Amino acid sequence: MTDFNAERRQTMLRVDNLTHRVSLETDTLTILQGVSLEINRGESVAIVGRSGSGKTTLLGLLAGLDTPSDGTVELDGSVISKLTEDERAKLRARRVGFVFQSFQLLPALTARENVMLPLELAGMESPEARARELLERVGLGERLNHTPRQLSGGEQQRVAIARAFASDPVILFADEPTGNLDNRTGQSVSDLLMELNREQGTTLVMVTHDEHLAARCGRQFHIEAGILTEPEAARELAD
């Protein structure tokens, strides 16, 4: 007998027939069309596509930053496509981490304070201890009191990764996490993401145009003109 409850517990992200349209003055632009996928807990997944293919729009919908025109997105048992904006924001604060290409650190705060801030807003105990622990884990134990402008691009992205993992998210979304970094620094940052994915069991979903970075993930999807496909070999491996 199939244990459907166990299956649902294992599935972190379920997307069914997702479509996203934008109304223009004289026409309607379809950015995503009929996207369906399932991602299990702890998986690392890459969504690969060229600029303008719809991958960043898809990531925003998966994370509940926007709502689709049609279809559903279920994240960790919650159908976020049916939640209000406030409800989605609360869910993201509790369960979701983000790493962006542009780092998005607050320039007036130190590395330690940037990591502490979301913890303080969430009312978590001992935010400073947690921030120190994670910054040491990403190799920035000696840079706790440096502001972003005193850090290199790679160091800033490490702070952003520490901040993303600070609240122990069940899933982390990364948007071109190495896009603003040179090859060597990008390799180091991708190493860190993969290590934390394995160590903490956090589901990792990233969008990238970098085929080498995507190849490090357990599964890959390709998106072109708003249509998502998974290579046959990857589907067989996942099964």
Image (cartoon, rainbow, N blue to C red):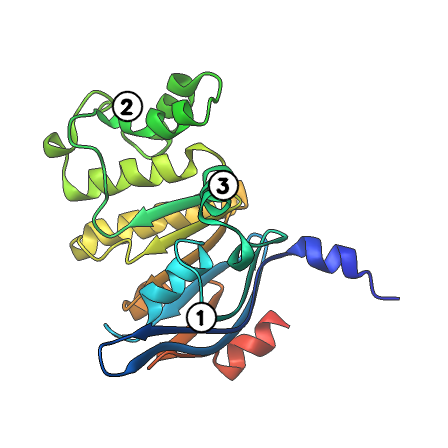
**Which corner quadrant holds the C terminus?**
bottom right
Kind of residue at badge 1: Ser
Whether pointer 3 and pointer 1 mark residues with C-beta atoms closer than 8 Å, the reply is: no
At x 44%, y 66%, the residue is 68
Q: Indicate left or right for 209 with 123 as reference.
A: left
Residue 176 visible in the displayed image: yes
Mark 1: few/some/many CA within 10 Å (<14, 14-19, 20+): some
Q: What residue is at 34 percent from the left and 68 percent from the top? A: 55
Residue at the spot of label 1:
69
Hey, which residue is sitting farthest front in the picture? Answer: 25
- Image coords of residue 149 (percent x, y): 10, 33
Who comes first in sequence, dot 2 or dot 1?
1
Mark 3, other Cα within 10 Å: few <14 / some 14–19 / many ≥20? some
Residue 169 disc label: 3
Q: Earlier in the sequence, mark 3 or mark 2?
A: 2
Rendered view: 59 above or below 105? below
Where is residue 132? Give x, y as percent.
35, 22
Residue 52 position, x and y percent, is 25, 74
Q: How many marks?
A: 3
| Residue wearing tag 2 | 113
Marks 3, 1: nearer the viewer: 1
Instruction: Give left or right: position of 166 versus 114.
Output: right
Q: Residue at x 17, y 24 (%)?
A: 146
Q: Secondary structure at mark 1?
A: loop
Q: Are marks 3 and 2 in contact (CB under 8 Å)?
A: no
30 versus 58 height, above or below? below
* Distance from Cα at disc 3 to Cα at disc 1: 27 Å
For the N terminus, which image quadrant? bottom right
